[in-house]
Image (cartoon, helix red, strand yellow):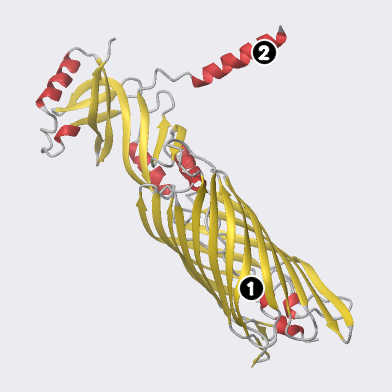
Amino acid sequence: MRLVLGILIVALGLTGLVIPNSAAEIEGIQLQVDGLSCPFCALGLDKRLKQRAGLDGIQVHLKQGVTEATLPHSQGLDVGKVQRAVQEAGFTLRGIKLTVIGKISRDGGHFTVVSRHDGTTFLLFDAEHQDTEAGSALSQALQQRLKHAQQTNRLVKLRGSVHEHAGLPAGLMIESFEELAE
Amino acid sequence: MSFTRLLGLGVLVLIFPASVFAVAINSDVGLTPSKEQWIIRSQLRYTKKSDDPTTQDRELEVFTMPQTLVYGFTEKASVILTIPFLSKELDATTDGIQTSRGDAGLGDLLLLGKYRLYTKDYPSATSRFSVVAGTDVPTGQSGDADARDKLPRDLQLGSGSADPLVGGAYTWQSLDDEWDLNLAYQFNTTANKFEFGDVLTYTVAYQRRVWPIKLPERGLYAQWNVVLEANGQWEQQAQSHGGRLDNTGGHLLFLSPGVQVATKHFVIESSIQIPVLQNLNGNQVEPDFALVASVRATF
């Protein structure tokens, strides 16, 4: 009986370890890291991303040149720190992709998304309209969808690539858009 | 007994600023550790020299255990400290009587600074060049004696002098293979009116992944590599009291096949160095081979 109870406790404990953090507001972080070309070199990147950028759950996929990470609950993402962490590890950050769950807002006429719990803000851009001038960086169709989400105060789930803006919030080049049921 | 004929060769095994990455086994590389990353390397090297052109039938065995510690101050600048423990034993026959002499203990520390000058990163590949400079520190005994007399220079554990070293290393590394080129020059200085000749070392190394044959799409993996290196060393003649010693210096070239297993935290490897060119001055005992095994860990 004790054995069965022990197994049950261990199983429950393990189950708890693999339950995804459903409250995560920035998730699915993927770093495209160039220059990472041996298993022995990966530990330095792992350490810098944890210590410098506060990321968690680091998983390096050598063949893809991609490193996946998660954020501790309620912690915002500092894109500059991620860039410096990769640089301090001795590699080159080619891009960041992530998913944000939050609400749409407007900042000086530009659409933004504000991550629900940690408050991280991203300026929004349209991946299909990268050639357009700033200010008209969103297609009409996407603008309509964002306006609707703002007016209805609905939660949205956006996935895209992140880029830095000096003195401004980071930009999110939207690749997928989904309105969530409350 | 002309022990001076062995001069220089006894210390040659130490002058390669050995790599601490998952790369060439017997030479340095262009890679540098991450900021605040530590790497430790524990190596065991056995060198045997027995091809004696004289009638003394000399045989020299050298066990070296260099312990290397590396720390990255930044992603480009690092410091490398090597602490060698040595054991040397020379057997020779004079007038039909076999003698054996030797010593064991701490050798000369090697302290190097390394800076990465060039970096070009690609998806899952990199091209890097670093320069290295430093000196060995005369921590090894250079005046030890046995029951018979003071030991000859080549059996001493240290050179007695601080000898600066400069060099450069280039590495091209991908998930499949790697090339390393390394050049280093050590300016040996005078101690007790004796000076080992300057030493130039050069290496061309190629490494090929043999396992896994097909890389997994996700995650890290333990990687098996085969390594082939050409390790060359050219040494000037030594000088004593201002005069050059005939039976010192020369040019050696080793071909060094090896095998290596690399993981995220450890590298385990082994190599054998086989001399393919031995152009030594005078009557010197020529090396038969050197065996190398080492473990590297990072934290």
- Picture quarter with the C terminus of chain A: top left
* Labelled disc at residue A6: 2
Against B26, is B158 above or below? Answer: below
| Percent coordinates x, y for residue B141 in the rendering | 74, 72
Give neighbour class at mark 1: few <14, some 14-19, many 20+ (Cα, 10 Å): some
Label 1 belongs to which residue?
B12
Quarter-wise, where is residue B57 in the image?
bottom right
B231 or A24: which is nearer to us? B231
Instruction: Estimate the spatial distance between the alpha carbons at disc 1 and disc 2, rounded to whole Å.
Output: 60 Å
Q: Residue furthest bottom?
A: B243
Q: Is residue B195 left or right of residue B1?
A: left
| Percent coordinates x, y for residue B33 in the rendering | 49, 52
Q: Secondary structure at mark 2?
A: helix
Tell me if residue B159 can be seen. Answer: no
Q: Please give the name of the residue rendered at 12% of the width and 20% of the height, measured from the top-left corner.
A: A144
Tell me if residue B96 can be seen. Answer: yes
Q: Residue furthest front?
A: B213
| Same chain letter for marks 1 and 2 | no
| Percent coordinates x, y for residue B85 in the rendering | 72, 63
- Picture quarter with the N terminus of chain A: top right
> Could you tell me the amino acid type at mark 2?
Gly
Q: Please give the name of the residue rendered at 70% of the width and 72% of the height, measured from the top-left corner.
A: B158
